Amino acid sequence: MKLLSYKQDRRSLLFILLCLLFLYIPFSINISIIYAPLWLMVSSFFCFSVCIVNHNHVHNAMFRYQWMNIILGVVLTICRGHTSVGVILAHNHNHHVYTGNDKDWIKPGLAGEGTGITRLLRFVFAAIVSMARGRRHANPSIIHTRLIRQKRLEQTTLLLLSAVLLYLDIVGFLIFVVLPWIVGVALLIGVNLLQHDNCIPNSKFNHSRNFTSRIGNWLCLNNGYHTVHHMRPELHWSRLPEVHQREVEPYMDSRLNQSSIIRYLTMNYLTTRCILQGEKK
């Protein structure tokens, strides 16, 4: 019996399993203080990876059966530290509709002026506040009743699990679970800025920046192919590279096609100063 809609999501399931192991093994074994920093780096990365898995899942459900997707939503929630379906309003119904313009709750303008590192850090906090404000004032009828029930299930599970882990080990919970949760979300929000900063919101092909490294996209489930994802969000992540090469790359500004996000971040972005007033978009 075929359970997955796409066999490529075996990799997604692997990342989820690794995330669960790195988050919750510290409650059964002692992690040496020598290895704790490395452990936290790896667990934070897998929290980030699962945020991407969740992003892909809310666009294109991983399983063929609804009950399995409901269970998956709960598992993704305890991997990420916030509900799986909670991203649908901010991402699917806002960011994809108003990409980069004034109505986008995570528009690049939230980063303000200054050097890249200053703007990146400012953006993470400003985007979180902006999304919280946006959700508060959004039309509740946008979200289907079924998703509201699922969100309650995910919230309840997360609260119960957090209560149990706090009872077992407060310090361990804060360090080995909450900290990777926070870093994972911060990385996801920061990457979004890199994908849209200084792009052209209303352009058909130049509204997003792409990162085409094979290794990076293997680890991040082709999240680097961002233009085609916004153009055709219903596409499964495994198809993004081929469609990008055929339908986007020949028509886009070549400067928005970067190889490595790490190279772009360190060599082009962190020390670059941005002045918003009079900035050419």
Image: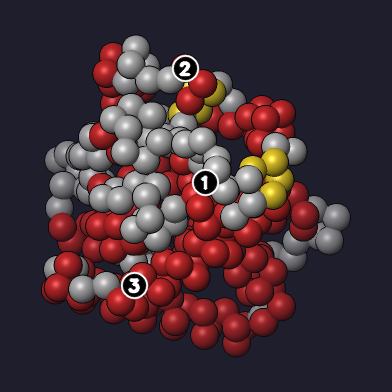
Q: Amino acid at mark 3?
A: Arg
Q: Position of residue 37 (x, y in %)?
A: 77, 54
Residue in the foreground of this view, choosing between 158 and 246: 246
> Residue shown at 64%/43% (left/top)?
274
**Residue under pointer 2:** 254
> Residue shown at 23%/35% (left/top)?
232
205 vs 189, left or right, is: left
Q: Is residue 50 above or below residue 245?
A: below
Q: Can see residue 236? A: no
Q: State the image quarter where residue 202 is shown.
A: top left
**Residue under pointer 1:** 193
**Colour option used:** secondary structure
Q: Earlier in the sequence, mark 1 or mark 2?
A: 1
Furthest-right residue in view?
Answer: 34
Under tag 2, what secondary structure?
A: helix
CB atoms of marks 2 and 3 within 8 Å: no
> Residue shown at 71%/45% (left/top)?
115
Q: Earlier in the sequence, mark 2 or mark 3?
A: 3
